[in-house]
Structures are given as C-alpha cells and as structure tokens.
Amino acid sequence: MELNAFRVEVAAQDRRLTARFVGDLTLDAEDALKNAFAHADFTARPAVVIDFASVPYVNSAGIAALLGTLIPLREQTSGIRFTGLSRHLEKIFRMTGFPALVTMEK
C-alpha cells in the first residue's frame, strides 16, 4: 500500500457512524469513499461524524469525490459533522461551500 493511500475506517455505535479518513483525499480516494458506507444501517437515520485528523492532503478531485459521497449520504442521516480539521482543510472546505452541507469542527 502506498504511504498516503486513502482508506476509510467506519464504526457504528448507537445512532452514530464514525468514519476516520486516512491518507490523501484525491481522485484515488473515490472508490474508498463510495464503498465506505455501503454496509452501514441507515434505518435509524444515524448522525455521521467524519474525522479528518489523518488526512494530510486534499485536492480538487478529492473534494469532488467527497461531495459525490456526501450529497446522497446527507439524505440518509440526521446530520454530518467534520472533525479533526487542520486550519488548511477547514479553509478549503469553507471556500468550497461545505458548511451548507455539514457542521465543521476543528
């Protein structure tokens, strides 16, 4: 596996799904993003928390892939929250309109 190859670690607890993103968020992350929540149970409309603490790099293709995952996911959840954001990632996500889709924390 490449040093910064992207992966998603998902854990379910009560009415919450926690996804830990690890690696560079680029076009190469698209398959991992598409498959990340494929086996999750959304019948109770869980809250989704996405941890970016282990994402060192993001580019425009990664942002597009993330949007492609979040837009349909939003309809199945009670809300999506980003955590573990570096200043740089927070700035990028704010500039690209993510606060309209998710709650963001550092």
Image: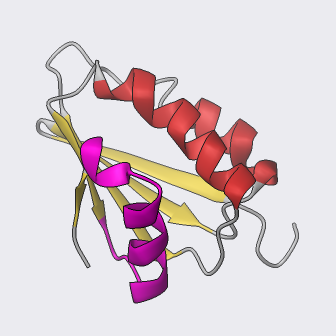
* Left or right placement of residue 85 versus residue 5 in this view: left
Q: Residue furthest bottom?
A: 87
Q: Residue furthest top?
A: 43
Q: Position of residue 27 (x, y in %)?
A: 79, 50
- Please determine whether, in this image, residue 98 is positioned above or below residue 20: above
Q: Position of residue 92 (x, y in %)?
A: 49, 70
Question: Which quarter of the rendering shows the N terminus?
Answer: bottom right
**Which region of the structure is painted magenta?**
83-101
Looking at the picture, the colour scheme in use is: secondary structure
Q: In terms of image quadrants, where is residue 58?
A: bottom right
Q: Position of residue 3 (x, y in %)?
A: 82, 79
Residue nearer the viewer, 2 or 73: 73
Residue in the image at 37% along x and 76% along y: 85
Q: How many marks?
A: 0
Q: Residue furthest right?
A: 2
Residue 100 painted magenta: yes
* Left or right placement of residue 51 versus residue 36 in this view: left
Q: Position of residue 71 (x, y in %)?
A: 42, 28
Question: Which quarter of the rendering shows the C terminus?
Answer: bottom left
Q: Main secondary structure of the magenta part?
A: helix
Residue 15 painted magenta: no
Q: In terms of image quadrants, where is residue 70?
A: top left
Residue in the image at 14% along x and 19% along y: 44
- Please determine whether, in this image, residue 5 is positioned above or below residue 44: below
Residue nearer the viewer, 75 or 32: 75
Residue in the image at 74% along x and 58% along y: 26
- Please determine whether, in this image, residue 25 is positioned above or below residue 19: below
* Left or right placement of residue 30 versus residue 41 in this view: right
